[in-house]
Image (tube, grey):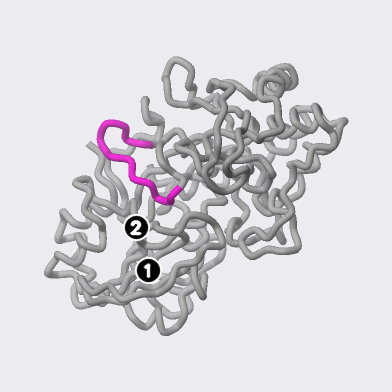
Amino acid sequence: MIQFGLDRLLADPALRRPLAGKRVALLAHPASLTRDLTHAVDALAALPDIQLSAAFGPQHGLRGDKQDNMVESSDYFDPQHGIPVFSLYGEVRRPTAPMMDRFDVLLVDLQDLGCRIYTFITTLRYVLEAAARHKKAVWVLDRPNPAGRPVEGTLLQAGWESFVGAGPLPMRHGMTMGELARWFIATLKLDVECEVVTMTGWEPDAAPGYGWPVGERSWVNPSPNAPNLSMARAYAGTVMLEGTTLSEGRGTTRPLELFGAPDIDARQVIAHMQAFAPKWLAGCRLRECWFEPTFHKHAGMLCNGVQIHVEDPTHYDHAKFRPWRLQALAFKAIRQLRRDYPLWRDFPYEYEHDRLAIDLINGSEILREWVDDATTRPGDLDALAQADEREWEEMRRTFLLY
């Protein structure tokens, strides 16, 4: 039976003993829950030996009420627990000195999706850096990476760091938040007291969850458009849709599992993908679909699109599924079918105004240039990505805990 870091901390007074007499803050979101679905802030506040002094919320807020990027949360006062709740996606992204003065130890309990662009890992980096400056301690209450251990994508290149690019990781990094904390501390050479309250019983290579404990834990959205395990598996590819004019399914019940637009022919796109790079479609099933977003891109318009199915074990192969390549292939198919298609979305993305969103998401111009160049083949992107993937797998080995 799996136990997350939060569950272990709550169950074992000996684990909590170093927190005695210290002011404790919590960084959390809606999925920061115990197995019985009690929120971490309520569970910790109920312990007589924990002095809860503040809480922090990342992007989308502690309560998860904010829908999209560049939709900010405000600070507020929690009347039930009598503590301030500070937003790290509002007026600031990094905790300020007055915020840091509210605690001695920060507990980080954030369910991640295993993708570089998911901003909770950037917030983790920022609080570790702030803790080093202010001589505070950080405890990471570890949780599973629902995308498991596979690695995919090119490394973020120097100069492309942003709120959606915390460091030189591949798009699909295959690490937990606790492991990433160890990597950040070593890579950034931080002098900070950091403890990882590890999980017990996590088996990232075990079927059917391959990272997520299916049948043992309820899935609760860590952000508004992360509704299920299928989305988490596909996200390292489908997140790139945020940098395009294609709908990623926001405003539908299957966000970031499908893509489409009113003016594409999904059957043609799928056929071209199958002809151009069939190996990149392994491990999943693609299905033509129709949808009408209720908000966001193409709201109220009928879209022809493609849904990526990664749930049924008869066609999902965890080791073979490569969402980053699959989505890159979809872009390539559209570009080859229609050279003049306005694929790349030119708009501010995470407060960046000067660089294309697709490049910011990928941490370089490599993928976009591969898509747009009519002469490039699958092997060209593979050669670039495989070198980075091998480098990352070797680099991360020291920091793995499971």
Q: Provide residue 365's location: percent of width, then percent of height.
A: 76, 49
Residue interval drawn in magenta = 212-224
| Amino acid residing under circle 1 | Phe
Q: Residue 286, located in which quarter of the rendered image? A: top right
Residue 294 — which label? Answer: none
Q: Nearer the viewer, residue 363 or 18?
A: 363
Image position of 255 with respect to 336: above or below: below
- Badge 2 marks a residue whose secondary structure is strand
Left or right of 220? Residue 44 is left
Q: Main secondary structure of the magenta part?
A: loop
- Inspect this view and state whether residue 393 appears: no
Q: Nearer the viewer, residue 150 or 97?
A: 97
- Which residue does the image show at 66% across and 25% down from the upper left? 266
Instruction: Give the position of the C terminus as an image quadrant.
Output: top left
- Which residue does the image show at 36% across and 36% down from the upper left? 212
Q: Can you identify the residue that label 1 sits on?
A: 56
- Badge 1 marks a residue whose secondary structure is strand
- Which residue does the image show at 48% across and 17% down from the upper left? 315
Q: Can you identify the residue that label 2 sits on?
A: 109
Callout 1 crowding tier (Cα within 10 Å): few <14, some 14–19, many ≥20 = many
| Amino acid residing under circle 2 | Asp
Q: Provide residue 81's location: percent of width, then percent of height.
A: 21, 72
Q: Nearer the viewer, residue 103 or 342?
A: 342
**First of labels 1, 2 by sequence position:** 1
- Residue 297 forms part of the magenta stretch: no
